[in-house]
Image (cartoon, helix red, strand yellow):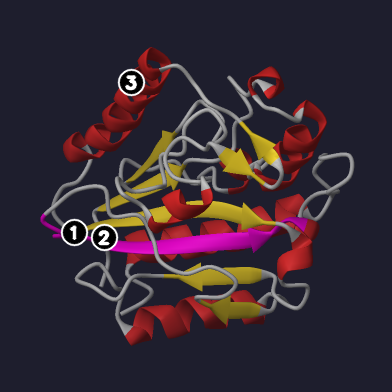
Amino acid sequence: MNFNNVILNIPHSSACRFNAEEWSNPEEITRYMREWTDWHTEKLFNPRQKTECIHSSLFPFSRFFVDVERLVNDPMETIGQGIIYSRFGEARRQLPDEEVSRRMEIYHQYLDSFKSLIADDTIIVDCHSFPGRLAPDVDFCIGFNDDESEPDDKMINNITHIIRKHGYRVAVNYPFSNSITPVRPITYKSIMIEVNKRTYMDETTLRPTLNAHHVSRVINIILNGFVEGHFQ
């Protein structure tokens, strides 16, 4: 099927509002921030073919400020990594109640913004990257949910074929699974595309490499396929 509305959710590409001094171990949390920010994904997923069908939703703040991918009562709360992280590795923080409330308001505003974006024939593309050490043998990860938002098998197979055709290795729901569903009821499809950072950037300097252009081209072929109905 083709989609008249493609929404790109880019939640983790920014380091804005990251404040290491909030944490018990500023040096350690800075290392984690450098590793777990999805650097340059706003450029990787930038549509080269400008079309009214593709819309970008870019969260402007760091996931260490507030993580808009987490759920209320998220299971990750048990390790201190829910919507507002309180623990990451050995680093700890405790924010004042009024600051927690302020950040939760930002969280809800971002998710509520999808209500005006979702229309008929919508697919959300959850745009991410992952550290190379997590899955050295995987270049792209395709993730989805086991619910109404799950794309059909033919679409998944066609996407993985495109990725392999361009010389990259792809896994399904590994090293991460699921995809964002910010609006209920679910009347749309949702798919996550995660890119191994080592395919497009230097993980030490955080700078993009020359191959970033090729990775972005593959992503754009997939995005255009959603609009043009290539996955039927």
- Residue at the spot of label 2: 3
- Residue at the spot of label 1: 121
Between 21 and 108, which is closer to the camera in this rendering?
21
Residue for point 29% across, 45% down = 72
Residue for point 82% across, 31% down = 27
- Residue at the spot of label 3: 101
In whole angstroms, how far apart are the C-alphas of marks 3 and 1? 35 Å
Q: Are marks 1 and 2 in contact (CB under 8 Å)?
A: yes
Direction right: furthest residue: 204
Left or right position of 48 against 186: right
Q: Amino acid at mark 3?
A: Ser
Quadrant assignment for the C terminus? bottom left
Q: Say which element carries label 3.
A: helix
Quadrant assignment for the N terminus? bottom left
Q: In which quadrant of the rendered view does residue 117 lie?
A: top left
Q: Is residue 200 magenta?
A: no
Span highlighted in magenta in the image: 185-197
Residue 155, image x and y in percent? Answer: 37, 79
Residue 223, image x and y in percent? Answer: 45, 58
Left or right position of 112 against 136: left
- Label 3 or label 1, whichever lies nearer to me, is 3
Q: Amino acid at mark 1?
A: Asp
